[in-house]
């Protein structure tokens, strides 16, 4: 809901997207086709080193039901059926993979003006259970998530966080890795006219007393060109340039350089081409 809090997974997402989204250091090609009948087809190819990966994804929407089927180069078939408003403000999704007969999973999301609840259960004899919840409003939300493996009778995760969203900035504080890591992130929308945005993320690991930080920026040179930069305390520097050379079709060039690396491999370069006729 627009007036209610987002899901727990969205706390800190704005900073994470600015610092990581669209960065690609391989060769990637994506072709998307969409018909007026609600049927969409997406073909993706990825070349990493000397290995090629690919998949074909088919998406069909009819009313409040969406069917998503993906087939990859290893003949794995992933299927997901999503039904919106199965109950008021409730969305349910059933997914499975072939030939993995233990991969079945049921996800249920419930959105309330003051709460967002997401749950997941594996459809097998020893399922993995996951539950997350966030309460508050679209401006301020407090949430937590937990995962439990019934096979080993142990918790796989338990995290908590708080997020603050305003028109010109967004901040988040997360306790992750079962309470072992504290993360703080901040995004500031400097100039809405040209899309200039800066972000920073800092993390502290209690066990090793280690601190890490990453800062980044995003700037729209013109309505069709976006430039992003990223700097980390580990000596890595990255830059991205994305150009919309035709409506909904993007070409993205990424570069990454590790100033502390001992090898002479030089910077990593990546190219991504996304076509939407």
Image (spheres, rainbow, N blue to C red):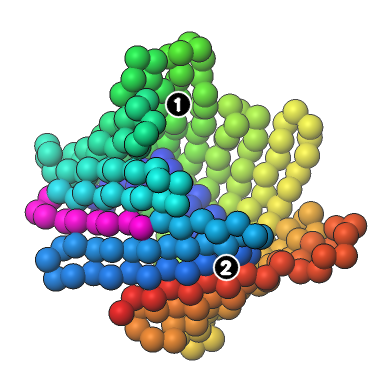
Give the residues drawn in magenta, as a range.
56-64
Crowding near pointer 1: few (<14 within 10 Å), some, many (20+)? some
From the viewer's side, name the closer residue of 128 and 117: 128
As drawn, which residue projects farthest toward the left? 63
Is 63 covered by the magenta stretch?
yes
Coordinates of residue 208 in the picture (x, y in percent): 79, 32
Q: Could you tell me if residue 20 is visible in this image?
A: no
Rendered image quadrant of residue 178: top right
Q: Is residue 22 above or below residue 172?
A: below
Q: Is residue 210 left or right of residue 123?
A: right
The numbered disc on residue 27 is 2
Coordinates of residue 144 in the picture (x, y in percent): 44, 32
From the viewer's side, name the closer residue of 2 and 84: 84
From the viewer's side, name the closer residue of 177 and 272: 272
Mark nearer the viewer, 1 or 2: 2
Coordinates of residue 252 in the picture (x, y in percent): 54, 75
**Residue at screen point 34% across, 50% down:** 70
Q: Could you tell me if residue 33 is visible in this image?
A: yes
Q: Is residue 81 left or right of residue 56?
A: left
Mark 1: secondary structure = strand
**Residue at screen point 62% across, 43% down:** 183
**Residue at screen point 27% across, 43% down:** 80
The numbered disc on residue 67 is none
Q: Is residue 76 left or right of residue 221?
A: left
Residue that carries the numbered disc 1 in the rendered image: 146
Rendered image quadrant of residue 145: top left
From the viewer's side, name the closer residue of 255 and 171: 255
């Amino acid at each position: 809901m627009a007036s209610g809090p987002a899901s727990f997974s969205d706390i800190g997402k704005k900073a994470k997207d600015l610092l990581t989204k669209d960065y690609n250091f391989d060769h990637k090609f994506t072709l998307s086709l969409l018909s007026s009948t609600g049927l969409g087809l997406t073909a993706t190819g990825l070349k990493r080193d000397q290995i090629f990966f690919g998949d074909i994804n088919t998406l069909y929407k009819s009313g409040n039901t969406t069917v998503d089927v993906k087939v990859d180069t290893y003949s794995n078939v992933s299927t997901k059926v999503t039904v919106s408003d199965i109950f008021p403000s409730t969305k349910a999704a059933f997914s499975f993979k072939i030939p993995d007969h233990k991969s079945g999973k049921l996800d249920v999301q419930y959105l309330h003006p003051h709460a967002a609840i997401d749950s997941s259960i594996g459809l097998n004899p020893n399922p993995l259970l996951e539950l997350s919840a966030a309460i508050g409003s679209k401006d301020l939300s407090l949430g937590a998530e937990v995962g439990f493996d019934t096979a080993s009778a142990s918790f796989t995760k338990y995290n908590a966080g708080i997020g603050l969203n305003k028109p010109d900035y967004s901040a988040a504080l997360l306790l992750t890795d079962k309470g072992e890591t504290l993360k703080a992130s901040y995004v500031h929308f400097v100039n809405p006219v040209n899309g200039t945005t800066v972000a920073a993320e800092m993390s502290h690991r209690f066990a090793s007393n280690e601190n890490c930080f990453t800062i980044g920026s995003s700037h729209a040179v013109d309505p069709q060109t976006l430039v992003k930069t990223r700097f980390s305390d580990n000596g890595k520097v990255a830059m991205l340039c994305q150009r919309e050379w035709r409506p909904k079709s993007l070409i993205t060039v990424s570069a990454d350089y590790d100033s502390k690396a001992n090898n002479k491999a030089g910077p990593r370069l990546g190219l991504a081409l996304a076509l939407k006729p």
